[in-house]
């Protein structure tokens, strides 16, 4: 009857029950992957390869940041991959087709992503369409729009000098060991996302809505507004990812994008974001994104066929969710 | 009178198909605890949800301190100083106590964007101090006991400087000592001039805590009286509209000597320790104890819903291995969960489907084809014999009252040919009138030779129904009493007998 008199749970149980555990496990897994691949192949732990991993993480990582917000709020967003492509295509339209200055084009790309998020948010929070269906609709809509707008052909940024540097230049880094801007952009975005999530009103309501939406509503909070805001945030990150991938490829590829949403969701889930809402961290998501790209990279270096890489990443996601379930059961 | 805080008059509210409130009135004074009672569906919660701005009345007026008010929504009600604490607590389990209290009005810095968590922690701390509570504002709500979570809700209400506090079944999930704590806080608030509305099914509590009682029936106002001047029996008869005799019905004649179920040395690390008992045909065995004593866990272990570390279950003299509920059903054991809606029924399906659900293979022919004529006949037969009040067997269970839902669950296990029936809190959430029907049904089942385990937290129910009583505390059986030996005092003594700790981590059964 009196819980105070209970002897404390063991250190192990306490750890497993703590929110930190999944992050620590994920981080440990990342280190283990690095060690294993480094031992398995001399080509793995090379500066150029590590940069490759970082670069591969950047786009998926940025997408996963937005998805983390949505999943913590108890929703899901299947449209981030194709929204990213839509944003990339719009950036191409603004810069290459319309000849607008690069900053305007970049802003346009971000807004395009934000708009897709706004539509998702309104459809979900006002029309009460389940997020899975609403964003599946947006997945197809942005995919189609990208193809229509670009007329099925890639838009190149050859005339916009400096656009490629947004992702591939290196403003910070020692000569000879340059780390591309795309990586810094991801880290910066992650820091901003982390602050928004932990310190601002938006972040608090993201957690609160995912934890118990009805309670938030009964507390007099305009839930529909904040839910919409969460999807707008997710759309903005997808827009940012669109700009980064366009800069990295120096082109907007309209047929790209499908499948990215699943990697982004996987990154969040591996990092300990609970699919039932209310739980998750940006740090965890970033680690999750790194695990995915490290795994893909390492398996490629070990000459594992691409088909098998997919099988392995699939298994890892299921394993991560399973570990999370065990952790929950021990509470 | 100027000490009247709230006056509701002529309040009507209809939902599709039901007149939930019909010309209701209610009055709340400053510094009083006003109990609101009535059977399930009498409209108590609806009336209070109108006051709290969750529902808009179709007709009627509300005046607050003499001023007519329009309550637009829950937010508006809070601003007027009216707060409601719902039966199912409305907290965000992943947030801290302080974050829960200040949800929706977080103090902000930095252009109104950045949260000031230090400030809310301080303010929450001050609130808890005012309530003489030992509670960490930074504790995650999911990690608090139900009682503490309720205190967080009360603190939240107080933080609005509420003058009107509505509590819907606040003690439903609390232990005795937690109820004392709650009552202390309630009396504190009353002394400070807060008006409290107290909705409860536990009539004996009202004598302890309330000043006045208002009775509702079928969406209408019945009467208001001073608690000290009205006997409980009178309250009950006003609630049901007829007189009910609370006297004990005759227990069915002595149980047979044939043992239906025997449990030997049941252990589950951290939950159950050395559980031994036997149950005869025709016997009703009461399981008493405080919340978290492990009674539900015993039932779930026998039923195969939870794994056990060691122990034997013997059904009709045969040792059986029950590894899953499927095995239990095959051996004629039925478990009627305390949470009917979650574990006992498919509420969105009809009576017929629910009745045959646990024994569907009896009704299936080639290739899984369900013989609907048979299922229908069976369902109709139980609707008759258990007198389930439903327009037809095709009615969705969600539309039935709690008592009738419970009967559907009983019908389900009878269809599955269960000889051993484990009832977990069989009358929870069931109104007074329907309770005595369930009791009659339990007696009838025992008379027919069913062996019954009845887990109950209501001592009067245990005393009234059981041939024998087993008392549990902290995962162990601490006492076994015959009906002659069983008194409230004896049971409570065993129920609080701690001794050596049986386990490390109590599962309340409500863990996520």
Image (tube, coloured by chain):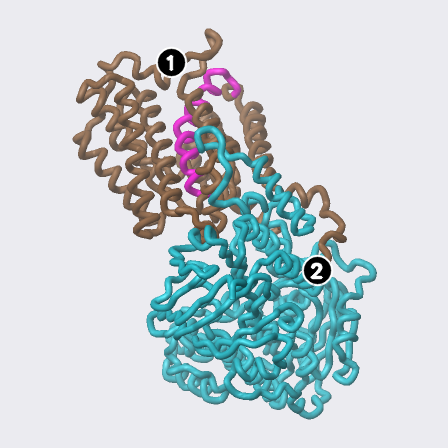
Check if residue A47 falls in the magenta segment: yes
SS class, disc 1: loop
> Chain in cyan?
B
Q: How many marks?
A: 2
For image coordinates 50% across by 85% down, the residue present is B241
Provide residue A191's location: percent of width, then percent of height: 48, 27
Extreme residue in the right direction: B499
- Name the image quarter holding residue A84: top left
Check if residue B267 falls in the magenta segment: no
- Label 2 to label 1: alpha-carbon separation: 61 Å
For image coordinates 80% across by 62% down, the residue present is B498
Residue underneath mark 1? A169
- Left or right of B368, for residue A254: left
Residue underneath mark 2? B271
For image coordinates 45% across by 75% down, the residue present is B354
Q: Which residues are magenta?
A: A45-72
Provide residue B294's location: percent of width, then percent of height: 69, 65
> Chain in brown?
A
């Amino acid at each position: 009857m009196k819980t105070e008199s209970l002897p404390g749970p063991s250190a192990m149980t306490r750890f497993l029950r703590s929110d930190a555990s999944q992050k620590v496990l994920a981080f440990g897994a990342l280190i283990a992957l690095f060690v294993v691949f480094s031992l398995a192949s001399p080509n793995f732990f090379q500066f150029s390869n590590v940069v490759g991993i970082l670069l591969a993480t950047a786009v998926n990582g940025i997408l996963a940041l937005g998805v983390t917000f949505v999943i913590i709020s108890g929703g899901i967003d299947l449209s981030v991959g194709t929204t990213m492509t839509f944003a990339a295509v719009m950036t191409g339209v603004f810069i290459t087709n319309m000849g607008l200055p690069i900053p305007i084009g970049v802003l346009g790309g971000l807004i395009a992503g934000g708009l897709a998020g706004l539509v998702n948010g309104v459809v979900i929070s006002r029309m009460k369409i389940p997020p899975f269906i609403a964003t599946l609709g947006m997945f197809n809509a942005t995919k189609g729009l990208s193809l229509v707008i670009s007329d099925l052909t890639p838009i190149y940024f050859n005339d916009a000098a400096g656009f490629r540097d947004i992702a591939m230049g290196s403003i910070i880094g020692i000569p000879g060991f340059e780390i591309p801007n795309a990586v810094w952009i991801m880290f910066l975005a992650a820091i901003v996302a982390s602050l928004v999530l932990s310190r601002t009103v938006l972040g608090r309501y993201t957690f609160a809505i995912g934890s118990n939406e009805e309670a938030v509503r009964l507390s007099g909070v305009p839930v529909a507004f904040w839910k919409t805001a969460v999807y707008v945030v997710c759309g903005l990150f997808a827009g940012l990812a669109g700009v980064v991938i366009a800069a990295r490829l120096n082109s907007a590829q309209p047929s790209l994008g499908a499948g990215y949403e699943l990697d982004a969701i996987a990154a969040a889930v591996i990092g300990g974001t609970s699919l039932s809402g209310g739980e998750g961290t940006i740090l965890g998501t970033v680690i999750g994104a790194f695990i995915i790209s490290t795994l893909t990279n390492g398996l490629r270096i070990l000459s594992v066929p691409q088909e098998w890489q997919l099988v392995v990443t699939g298994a890892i996601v299921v394993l991560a969710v399973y570990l999370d379930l065990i952790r929950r059961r021990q509470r | 009178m100027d000490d009247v805080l709230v006056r509701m008059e002529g309040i009507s509210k209809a939902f599709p198909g039901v007149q939930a409130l019909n010309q209701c009135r209610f009055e709340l004074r400053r510094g009083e605890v006003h109990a609101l009672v009535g059977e399930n569906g009498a409209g108590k919660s609806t009336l209070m949800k109108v006051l709290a701005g969750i529902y808009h009345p179709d007709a009627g007026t509300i005046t607050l301190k003499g001023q007519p008010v329009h309550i637009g929504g829950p937010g508006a009600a809070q601003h007027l100083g009216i707060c409601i604490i719902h039966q199912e607590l409305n907290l965000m389990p992943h947030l801290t106590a302080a974050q829960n209290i200040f949800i929706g009005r977080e103090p902000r810095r930095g252009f109104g964007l950045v949260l000031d968590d230090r400030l809310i922690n301080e303010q929450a701390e001050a609130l808890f101090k005012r309530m003489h509570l030992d509670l960490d504002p930074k504790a995650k709500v999911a990690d608090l006991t139900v009682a503490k979570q309720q205190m967080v809700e009360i603190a939240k209400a107080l933080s609005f400087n509420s003058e009107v506090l509505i509590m819907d079944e606040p003690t439903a999930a609390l232990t005795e000592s937690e109820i004392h704590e709650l009552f202390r806080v309630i009396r504190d608030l009353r002394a400070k001039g807060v008006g409290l509305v107290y909705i409860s099914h536990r009539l004996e509590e009202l004598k302890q805590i309330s000043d006045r009682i208002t009775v509702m029936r079928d969406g209408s106002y019945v009467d208001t009286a001073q608690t000290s001047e009205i006997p409980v029996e009178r309250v009950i008869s006003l609630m049901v509209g007829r007189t009910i005799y609370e006297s004990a019905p005759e227990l069915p004649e002595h149980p047979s000597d044939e043992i239906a179920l025997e449990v030997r040395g049941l252990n589950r690390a951290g939950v159950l320790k050395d559980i031994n008992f036997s149950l005869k045909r025709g016997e009703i065995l009461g399981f008493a104890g405080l919340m978290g004593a492990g009674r539900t866990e015993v039932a779930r272990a026998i039923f195969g819903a939870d794994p056990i570390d060691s122990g034997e279950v013997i059904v009709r003299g045969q040792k059986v291995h029950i590894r899953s509920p499927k095995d239990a059903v095959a051996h004629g054991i039925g478990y009627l969960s305390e949470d009917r809606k979650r574990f006992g029924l498919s509420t969105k399906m009809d009576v017929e489907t629910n009745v045959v659900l646990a024994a569907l293979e009896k009704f299936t022919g080639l290739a899984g084809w369900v013989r609907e004529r048979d299922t229908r006949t069976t369902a109709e037969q139980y609707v008759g014999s258990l007198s389930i009040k439903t327009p037809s067997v095709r009615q969705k269970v969600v539309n039935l009252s709690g008592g009738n839902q419970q009967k559907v669950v009983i019908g389900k296990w009878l269809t599955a040919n269960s000889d051993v029936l484990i009832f977990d809190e069989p009358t929870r959430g069931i109104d007074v009138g329907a309770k005595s029907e369930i009791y009659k049904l339990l007696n009838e089942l025992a008379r027919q030779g069913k062996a019954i385990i009845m887990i109950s937290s209501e001592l009067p129910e245990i005393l009234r129904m059981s041939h024998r009583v087993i008392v549990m505390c902290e995962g162990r059986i601490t006492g076994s009493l015959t009906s002659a030996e069983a008194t409230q005092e004896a049971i409570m003594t065993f129920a609080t007998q701690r001794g050596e700790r049986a386990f490390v981590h109590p599962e309340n059964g409500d863990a996520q």
